[in-house]
Every structure is written in structure tokens, then in C-alpha cells.
Amino acid sequence: MSISSRKIFYQRQLSPKFQEIYDLKTSNLGHWWLTLVYKYIVSHLKAMPFIYILPLSGVAAFLLYLILGQLVVKLVTLLQHGF
Amino acid sequence: MDFEKKSFGFLASLILFLKRALLLVLYPYKTMRRISRERDTAQLWIIFFFVFSYFLIADKVRLSADLFPLHFIVTMINFIFTVYFFYFLARLFSRETSLMPFIFTLGYSLIPTLIWFFANLILFVILPPPRTWSLPGTLFSVIYIIFSISLLFWKLILVYLGIRFSSKLSALRIVYYLALYLCIFLPYSFFLYLMALFRIPFI
């Protein structure tokens, strides 16, 4: 790659990417441990979040079923009326 | 010629809207970043058209067709209130914040809500409540709850990303603002629920 084409590549391709990266300040949750957890979760939810959302929702629904029992059926009936 | 140009422009906006709706499922972060820079208002009109169509159909099914303009107006007022709420809070910290990214990102974050309400409408017609404590009834209830929680998670992700890209605020501040918003919005939506103007405090 010649110097001029490399320059064009930087201007057209890399510069907007860098602008995108530095457009947002990095999030700091006040404590290094919390920030680490936040960054770990966010990195998994940036692309294909449903890979994590669906099993999590399944666990949440199962827990709700264990805790509420028959009330889950009543809750669904109530929600179905809420269209 | 002008009509042709406008119809092609609208078709392009419709295709872009459908593409972004799909990409919000697959790549919410990248897609929301792009949406926050969007200026094509036709995409917003498409979203509002879906909201309008929902109320038109739902109120007919509910046998309260006269109320549909009122339901639509209340929803639009809620949307404008939400947009200005986060916009003004973001303006407190940055004078460069503009309104359009909030309208676009929060507009697109209505997609999970629309999917939930349309799915609920279809299910109401196909499998009308009440659900029973039988095996099929319980199985349906659990699947329905998985579906609802998934959409709620997705909605939360989209709202968070929308506010983050529109306001450029830190995560912690956005969480504070969302908590403040819920403190105001939940009693308000409950009041609307009592007035029969609001169905579920989810939108």
C-alpha cells in the first residue's frame, strides 16, 4: 500500500471509527468491581443479546412459577386483558 | 415525477426501518448508534403509523372503537413527555445535546412494545383468557411470561442505549435518570390505568 493510499484509508475508514469510539466517555460506576461487572455484561449484550436474554427469561419465568404457583396463571390472564 | 420521487423515498425509508428493526435484535449497540445520527423523519412516521394501527385494531377488538383517537393521543403525549424528560435532563450537563437523537432512539425503542401489544392482541383473539391451571394452560402461561420478560429486557437495553447515545451521559447517571423517570411515570400511568386510558404500564 502506497503512502497516499494509506492516508486515504486512514481518512476514510479509520478516522470515523476512532470518532465513534471516542464519541462516548467510558462508563465508571464509582467502584472498580462494579465497573468491571458492568463492562462484562455490556460486552455480551452488544451483539446477539437474545442468546443471553432468552435463557435468563426462562430462568426468571421458572422462578416466578415456583414462587407464585397458581398466581402465574392469573397474572397471564390479567396481562392478556391488557392488549 | 414528484410523486414518483416521494414514493421511492418512502419505500427507501420503509426498507431502512425494517432493516434497522431486525438489526436491533441482532446488533442493538451498533444499530442504536446509527439511529442516533438519523435525520430521516419518514422512519418515525412509519413507527407512529404502527402505533396508530395498533390502537385502531385493538379498540375494534375491545369493542371501544370510539376511544381509539384518545388512546393514540395519550400515547403520543406520553412519548413526547418521555423524550423531553430525558432531553432536558441531558441539557443540564451538556449544551450541545440536540433533541432529534432522543426522538429517533426512543421512537425505535417502541418496537418491542409494539411487538408485545400486537402479539397480545393476536393471542387474545386466538386463545382468549382466562387461562386455567391445566397442563396446557400452565405451559402457555410460562411461555407467555418468557416472551414478555424477553421483550422487557430488550426494551430496557434499547432505552438505555438510546439515552446513552443521545445524551452521551455516563451509565450511572442514566440509571439515576431512569429511576427518577419511573418514580414519576409509574404513579402517572397507574392514574391513567384507573381512568381506562392506559392498559399496562409497560409502554
Image (cartoon, coloured by chain):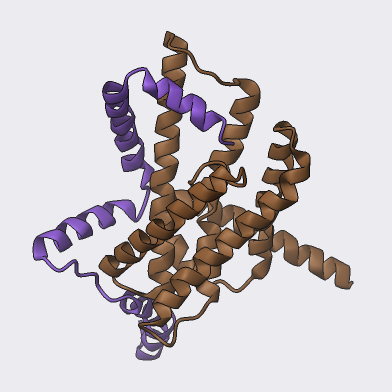
Q: Position of residue B151 (x, y in %)?
A: 44, 42
Q: Which chain is brown?
A: B
Q: Is residue B34 visible?
A: yes
The answer to whether residue B66 is above or below residue A31 is above
The answer to whether residue B196 is above or below residue B23 is above
Which residue is at 31% across, 24% downward? A68
Work out whether residue A11 or residue B166 is closer to the camera in this orientation and state it: B166
Q: Position of residue A20 (x, y in %)?
A: 37, 75
Q: Position of residue B181 (x, y in %)?
A: 40, 61
Residue A16 occupies which quadrant of the picture?
bottom left
For residue B57, side relative to residue A74 (left or right): right
Q: Position of residue B156 (x, y in %)?
A: 39, 52
Which residue is at 71% across, 52% downward? B70
Q: Is residue B29 visible?
A: no
The answer to whether residue B100 is above or below residue A42 is below
Q: Colour of chain A?
A: purple
Which residue is at 42% across, 17% downward? B139
Q: How many marks?
A: 0
Q: Quadrant of the N terminus of chain A?
A: bottom left
Work out whether residue A12 or residue B153 is closer to the camera in this orientation and state it: B153
Which residue is at 85% across, 66% downward? B4
For residue B175, side relative to residue B1 (left or right): left
